[in-house]
Amino acid sequence: MSEPVIAATEPFAVDVKEGKSYWWCACGQSAKQPFCDGSHKDTDFEPLEYKASKDRTVYFCGCKQTSKNPMCDGTHSKL
Ligand code: FES
Ligand code: FES
């Protein structure tokens, strides 16, 4: 498995809507961070679905090094 690209060294705050699905970019190559734009097609990565259980602000990992995909777990602060 290759390593993901570090798209950003901080999380992306997104206001999610209850019941809506969001596809988090795991490869780091999307131009539409933090979401997948199909750029993973030549990589070993697949996007990860996040389904919002309620309206709220969540923090999607931008560095792609988190152990709590797709959410930021603070790992970016060590990069
Ligand atoms: Fe990165 Fe799809 S573009 S997972
Ligand atoms: Fe990746 Fe915080 S942005 S762990």
Image (tube, rainbow, N blue to C red):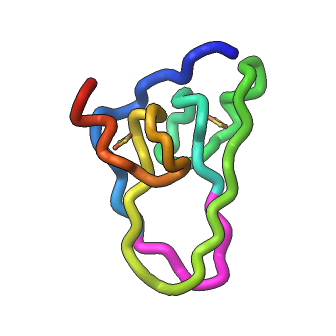
Q: Nearer the viewer, residue 23 or 2?
A: 2
The quarter of the displayed image where residue 78 is located:
top left
* 71 relative to 75, above or below: below
Residue 49 lies in quadrant: bottom right
Residue drawn where x is 30% and y is 35% of the image: 76
Q: Which stretch is magenta?
A: 15-22
Report the quarter where the C terminus lies.
top left
Q: Position of residue 50 (x, y in %)?
A: 63, 62
Would residue 51 appear left or right of 5 to someone viewing this image?
Answer: right
**Vertical position of residue 59 compared to residue 34: above or below:** below
Q: At x 42% / y 30%, what residue is drawn?
A: 7
- Quadrant for ligand 2 reads top left
Check residue 20 for magenta coloring.
yes
Name, please, the residue furthest toward the left: 77
Residue 21 as seen in the image, left or right of residue 62: right
- Where's residue 1, x and y in %? 69, 16
Could you tell me residue 43's position as x and y percent?
A: 72, 20
Q: Within the magenta stretch, is there residue 19? A: yes
At 54% from the left and 48% from the top, the residue drawn is: 69
Horizontal side of 41 relative to 6 (left or right) equals: right
| 26 lies left or right of 10 | right
Residue 41 in percent (x, y) is at 77, 26
Residue furthest toward the top? 2
How many numbered marks have been drawn onto this rendered protein structure?
0
